[in-house]
Amino acid sequence: MEASRIGVIFDCDGTLLDSMRVWREAETELARRANVTLSAADTDALTAMTIPECGAFFHERFGLGASGDEVIAMMDELMLAFYRERVLARPGALAFVQGLAERGVRMSVASSSPQPYLQAGLERCGFAPYFDAIVSVDDVGASKREPAVYDRAREAMGTPLATTWGVEDSVYAVHTLNAADYRTLGIYDCDISGTVESLREAAERFIATFEDLDAATFIEWN
């Protein structure tokens, strides 16, 4: 198959960027400000939420801030400096992306994070030039519980659904991709919505790290 007919839609946090633990720390800090302790169910629910949903959750459930928007401002304060100054790529991720680009594979990003976080982090770590599109769930008005963010990213690449992959670290997102007939590659990070075994079972292909996969091998899967 021609590599240019292959599309890869990468998740950002926990997939390309080593950032998921900072998200957990931010949620813990918001809970501290609200004088509450997050339950396992709370943390699981937050994993699949958009930023506006997170803001509304902390405000409506725990009374944090004067509004959901004020909670979002708190999150921006906690997160933007991290993406601009400290975030790192996951091991092997940039080399894998560069290898795909050299072979003509089309690539994009679909993320639950807002555009300012995405642009800052992907630019800092050197990923930005390789993508046809960087799409946030905010751009489509739907979380990753629905396929709209992936569909928008695929449209930007112009690749057939049958040869377009979603690369995700979250089990719930892999389930969304599977239901929409995308091919799936799971890469485990610290997903609290599922175990490494459940991600391995849900995804068509699975890796522990991008260091375990090179571009040539990936193309052979198509």
Image (cartoon, rainbow, N blue to C red):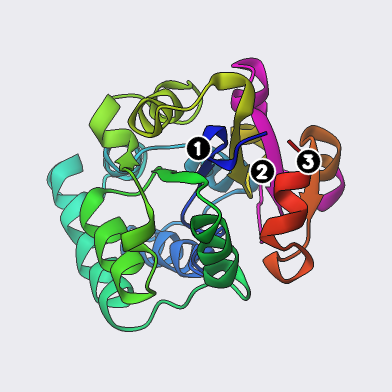
In the picture of the structure, the residue carrying the numbered disc 1 is: 48
Q: Amino acid at mark 2?
A: Ser
Residue 113: give x, y in percent of width and height: 35, 49
Q: Amino acid at mark 3?
A: Trp
Residue 111 in the image: above or below residue 160: below
Residue 208: give x, y in percent of width and height: 78, 62
Disc 1 element? loop
In the picture of the structure, the residue carrying the numbered disc 2 is: 193
Q: Mark 1 or mark 3: which comes first in sequence? A: 1
Q: Amino acid at mark 1?
A: Ala
Residue 165: give x, y in percent of width and height: 61, 36
Disc 3 element? loop
2 vs 3, front mark: 3
Asked whether the residues under the numbered discs 2 and 1 touch, taking CB atoms below 8 Å apart as contact, a structural biologist would say yes
The residue lying at 50 percent from left, 49 percent from top is 104
The residue lying at 35 percent from left, 45 percent from top is 62
In the picture of the structure, the residue carrying the numbered disc 3 is: 221
Residue 158 lies left or right of residue 5; in this view the side is left
Quadrant housing the C terminus: top right
Residue 88 lies left or right of residue 63; in this view the side is right
In the figure, residue 27 lies in which quadrant? bottom left
Q: Would you say residue 188 is visible in this rendering?
A: no
Disc 2 element? loop
Q: Residues within 10 Å of mark 1 (few under 14, many from 20)?
A: some
Q: Mark 2 or mark 1: which comes first in sequence? A: 1
Residue range corresponding to the magenta coloring: 175-197
The residue lying at 35 percent from left, 24 percent from top is 142
Give the CA separation, mark 2 to mark 1.
9 Å
